[in-house]
Amino acid sequence: MTAPSLSPPPANGILVLEDGYFSRGDLFSSVGQASGEVVFNTSPTGYQEILTDPSYAGQIVVLTTAHVGNYGVNAEDLESSRTRAAGLIVRDYHPTPSNWRANRSLASSLAEAGVAALSGLDTRALVLHLRDTGVLRGVVRALPHALSGLPLAGNLADHPHDDLSRMVRDASDVPPMAGLDLASRVTCTAPWTAGDASSKLHVVALDFGIKLNIVRQLHHVGCRVTVVPASTPAEQILALEPTGVLLSNGPGDPEPVTYAVETIRALLGRVPIFGICLGHQLLGLACGGRTYKMRFGHRGGNHPVRALETGRIEITAQNHGFAVEGSSLDGRQVTITHVNLNDDTVEGLRHRRYAAFSVQFHPEASPGPHDSHHLFHRFAQMMERGR
């Protein structure tokens, strides 16, 4: 029997970062171009949910898990209507799914969405580079023939070439995430509803890039949900007679989303509020706090968080590059309820006077652990008391 070939795939694509770092690989989605902020996610599974999460808009995602594509793609595990990530970088891509739920391959799904994907890269080396330097802007390109002699990875300083210099300039021209309002780009264009119309709990969800599993979890605790565009003003929200308002996750910098901060300030004290991820950051801003861009953020399904009021430690799913600055919060109005055990960043807030709380992590956890599902029950109980 002839042994299978262990030769690496053809290097017909390249990832180039703004600092000159490059890594070659195989373009497996038949799309040869992408640009965005390059970030890494440490979840061992859930690539479909990650790629369709609107919070990844404008980002090229590096997955640290070794095998991607082996269980394909299906219609039930989408977190939004389409792929949202700007690009995908993986170590090993498996083109033939082995899963009875799969409708198609990951490559065909990415190709249909026009999303470039590279495999065969040393993702461990790439992630270590991003961890040490902080996240960087980058581009994915088809490898020019003139660069076919490049090593599999390296830096422009050691391999000067006009084509490579041009790609570094392209990466440097990608708009920085700081100062970028991406919520307005991914939000719905018109309200939509889901759930039993007879439900006593009616949640209006401000869509900054909402994941579908948030809506599913709200259904699970007995809520009817009306999802509205991010720019919906407070009076229009209140006219829908909600028993609670959810501030969803989403991409980009919270500080430019001033319209949402104004809306949240107008809602505080008038209706119970629950914020998740970007919604948490916006609640922090509405309460007078500040936010900042993190060095490389938190993205993955294994982040430990301590609930300060109970001492309980939960393993959480996270996806964010900005955080609330704890020292900027007025402790007479807001109390910090959760902290990240890896770096002590703020992971949760509660207003001392009004029925409003938020968490930086993702209690809907898709993908990720289910330790924090109880927060949806807490929100439902808060709304019941408000009624």
Image (tube, grey):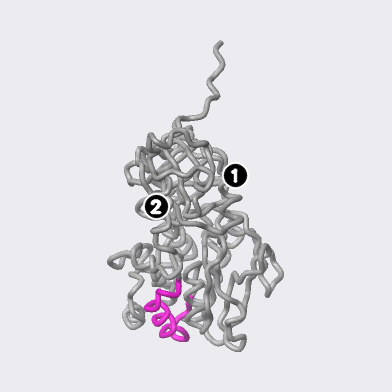
Left or right: where does residue 210 sit relative to residue 311? left
Residue 177 on image: x %, y %: 44, 64
Dividing the picture into quarters, in which one does residue 58 lie? bottom left
Left or right: where does residue 190 sit relative to residue 28? left
- Please name whichever residue, 305 or 221, is drawn nearer the observer in this view of the structure: 305
Determine which residue is flagged by label 1. 124
Determine which residue is flagged by label 2. 35
Label 2: which secondary element? strand
Dividing the picture into quarters, in which one does residue 223 lie? bottom left
**Which residues lie in the magenta part?**
254-273
Q: Is the residue 144 above or below the residue 248 in the image? A: above
- Please name whichever residue, 116 or 222, is drawn nearer the observer in this view of the structure: 116
- Would you say residue 255 sits in the magenta stretch? yes
Residue 26 on image: x %, y %: 44, 35
Look at label 1 and name its amino acid.
Arg
Q: Give the Cα distance between marks 1 and 2.
A: 21 Å
